[in-house]
Image: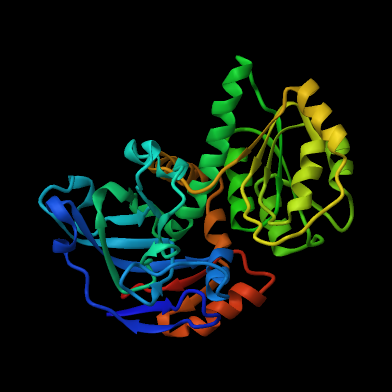
């Protein structure tokens, strides 16, 4: 079957690779789920892997099938798979697989202390940019049929769910924490979906992003009553003074100096969630004494978050169902850029890297 693959470490090596068809026999103990792919989403991680910056092929292979944001439909299951995965069921597969740490052993591979990660489409495991895949039911999450048009958003949604859940869990230290105001830094898919999740929890949300309004993103956020402010018009300190204090800030820009601006602007008893990866060597002058004093006297917390557990995928399904009820059609509007078929991979990369109006770029693989 066809798959979209590259040679890790070799820039711009994306190509169509013919690979064997997966079978239920590939998964032990009768726990396999055979899935036909419907959609594969793209993000900055895929661009970085295509640029040769990171990514590792499975052992014994010189290529890596990419694609970690996924949506598929069950074709067939093994004899020990629960009835939740009946043929025709929509499913999304998790990305990271267990390693050897104690966290991996309890199903929390998103918190692994291993140095080596096993992530489908990223490191040591083939991804989902293919016609079919097979996986253990332990790592596949069923979706209701009404999420057919937006289910490819679940993987990035799970990342948002984990960050927000971590914040609420940490804040149990306060015994009483009733956040009122939140700021989301960045208006990519993670930022947009985080703003949605926070609105569904009743918070007043401000999104701070680079592009000036009006824009497609500012309009979308306005439709769920999220305030949009451009970094080209005001500093984040000014935004915090005008619209804070912020009880929760989620940083998803990929611009590390802004994380430290957010740390200084965070309100008392607040929590700052860092959700973006920064692989460069950027430096910045920072008011370290002010940040340190603010965190000590203000009982503040900064926490990093990456990946997601099965529970976060399930929370994501719940919030997406709620969003369809509260803000009908809003999620579908995030799917701005459809690319038809694996063979259109050059356009896929071009849209990801060059289309400034794109929110979610995805490859449509629906066989009809």
Q: Quadrant of residue 300?
A: top right
Residue 78 at x, y percent in the picture: 13, 55
Residue at 83%, 55% in the rendered image? 231
Q: Identify the residue at the far top of this view.
A: 175
Q: How is the image coloured?
A: rainbow
The quadrant of the rendering that contains the N terminus is bottom left
Residue 244 shows up from this direction: no
> On the picture, is 266 further left or further right than 158?
right
Q: Nearer the viewer, residue 264 or 327?
A: 264
Residue 273 at x, y percent in the picture: 64, 40
Residue 232 shows up from this direction: yes
> On the picture, is 343 further left or further right than 86?
right
Q: Nearer the viewer, residue 162 or 49?
A: 49
In this view, 205 is above or below 330: above
Residue at 19%, 56% in the rendered image? 32
> On the picture, is 239 further left or further right than 78?
right
Residue at 39%, 76% in the rendered image? 63
Residue 75 at x, y percent in the picture: 21, 63
In this view, 148 is above or below 294: below
Residue at 85%, 45% in the rendered image? 286
> On the picture, is 34 further left or further right than 242?
left
The quadrant of the rendering that contains the C terminus is bottom left
Residue 202 at x, y percent in the picture: 62, 33
Q: Nearer the viewer, residue 92 or 89?
A: 92
Q: Nearer the viewer, residue 303 or 325?
A: 303
Q: Quadrant of residue 182?
A: top right
Give the total of numbered labels: 0
């Amino acid at each position: 079957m066809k798959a979209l693959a590259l040679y890790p470490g070799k820039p711009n090596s994306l190509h169509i690779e013919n690979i064997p068809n997966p079978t239920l026999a590939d998964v032990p103990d009768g726990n396999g789920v055979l899935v036909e792919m419907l959609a594969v989403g793209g993000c900055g991680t895929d661009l970085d892997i295509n640029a040769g910056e990171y990514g590792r092929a499975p052992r014994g292979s010189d290529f890596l099938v990419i694609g970690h944001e996924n949506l598929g439909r069950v074709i067939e299951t093994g004899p020990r798979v629960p009835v939740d995965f009946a043929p025709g069921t929509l499913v999304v597969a998790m990305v990271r697989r267990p390693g050897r740490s104690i966290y991996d052993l309890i199903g929390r591979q998103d918190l692994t202390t291993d140095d080596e990660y096993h992530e489908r489409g990223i490191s040591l495991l083939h991804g989902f940019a293919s016609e079919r895949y097979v996986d253990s039911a332990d790592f596949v999450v069923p979706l209701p049929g009404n999420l057919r048009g937006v289910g490819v958003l679940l993987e990035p949604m799970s990342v948002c769910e984990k960050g927000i859940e971590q914040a609420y869990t940490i804040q149990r230290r306060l015994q009483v924490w009733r956040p009122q105001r939140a700021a989301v830094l960045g208006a990519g898919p993670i930022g947009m979906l985080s703003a949605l999740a926070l609105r569904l929890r009743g918070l007043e949300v401000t999104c701070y992003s680079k592009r000036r309004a009006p824009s497609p993103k500012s309009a979308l956020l306005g439709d769920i009553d999220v305030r949009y402010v451009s970094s080209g018009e005001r500093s984040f300190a000014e935004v915090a003074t005008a619209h804070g204090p912020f009880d929760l800030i989620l940083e998803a820009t990929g611009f590390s100096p802004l994380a430290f601006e957010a740390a200084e602007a965070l309100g008392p008893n607040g929590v700052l969630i860092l959700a973006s990866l920064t692989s460069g060597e950027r430096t910045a002058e920072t008011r370290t004494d002010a940040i340190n004093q603010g965190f000590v006297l203000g009982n503040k917390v900064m926490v990093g978050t990456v990946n997601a557990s099965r529970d976060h995928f399930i929370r994501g399904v719940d919030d997406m169902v709620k969003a369809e009820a509260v803000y009908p059609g809003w999620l579908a509007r995030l799917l701005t850029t459809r690319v038809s078929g694996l063979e259109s991979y050059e356009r896929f990369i071009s849209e990801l890297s060059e289309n400034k109006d794109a929110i979610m770029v995805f490859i449509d693989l629906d066989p009809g």
